[in-house]
């Protein structure tokens, strides 16, 4: 029986490591980091881990907003989406993810572009509109 993409990616631990590196790479990328200016980073990381895990056949369930709602009024450009994909590919390469697995993952995530991009432009580094309402921060457990 063939392994799921989730298994071939290395499971939750490997996906979590990739997401953390990807998050840091995006934070340092002036082409896209303005779009994350008001994002709760802990929430973003948790949602990305769950989203990639579920999409790749893992046991997690993504419980975040749909991509259209999550990116509504962010004014994400085609150039910014493409820059994000470049950052993801660079992270996958850093972790030695094979081409077949990269292609399969990008094939799953690629169709989300239609729900994320609102501006057909090659521009990058555009500011997050003041009107954008980010998702609420994750509730933190009390000790």
Image: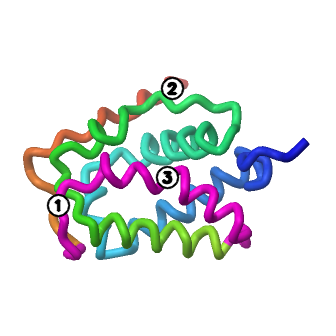
Q: Is residue 44 magenta?
A: no
Q: Are marks 3 and 2 in contact (CB under 8 Å)?
A: no
Residue at disc 3, secondary structure: helix
Q: Position of residue 49 (x, y in %)?
A: 57, 44
Residue at label 3?
Answer: 109
Q: Is residue 70 left or right of residue 73?
A: right
Q: Residue at x 59, y 41 (%)?
A: 55
Q: Which residues are magenta?
A: 95-124
Q: CA distance from mark 1 to mark 3?
A: 19 Å
Residue at label 2?
Answer: 141
**Number of on-image labels:** 3
Dividing the picture into quarters, in which one does residue 34 lie? bottom left
Compared to 115, does 19 lie above or below?
below
Q: Is residue 122 left or right of residue 9?
A: left
**Label 1 CA crowd tier, 10 Å (few <14, some 14–19, many 20+):** some
Q: Residue at x 20, y 75 (%)?
A: 123
């Amino acid at each position: 029986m063939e392994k799921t993409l989730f298994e071939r990616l290395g499971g939750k631990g490997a996906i979590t490591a990739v997401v953390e590196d990807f998050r840091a790479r995006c934070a340092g990328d002036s082409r896209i980091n303005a779009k994350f200016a008001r994002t709760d980073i802990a929430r973003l990381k948790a949602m990305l881990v769950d989203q990639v895990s579920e999409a790749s056949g893992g046991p997690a369930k993504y419980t975040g907003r749909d991509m259209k709602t999550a990116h509504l009024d962010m004014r994400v450009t085609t150039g910014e989406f493409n820059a994000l994909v470049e950052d993801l590919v660079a992270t996958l390469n850093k972790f030695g993810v094979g081409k077949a697995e990269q292609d399969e993952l990008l094939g799953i995530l690629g169709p989300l572009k239609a729900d994320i991009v609102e501006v057909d432009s090659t521009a990058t580094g555009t500011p997050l509109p003041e009107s954008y309402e980010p998702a609420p921060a994750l509730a933190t457990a009390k000790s």
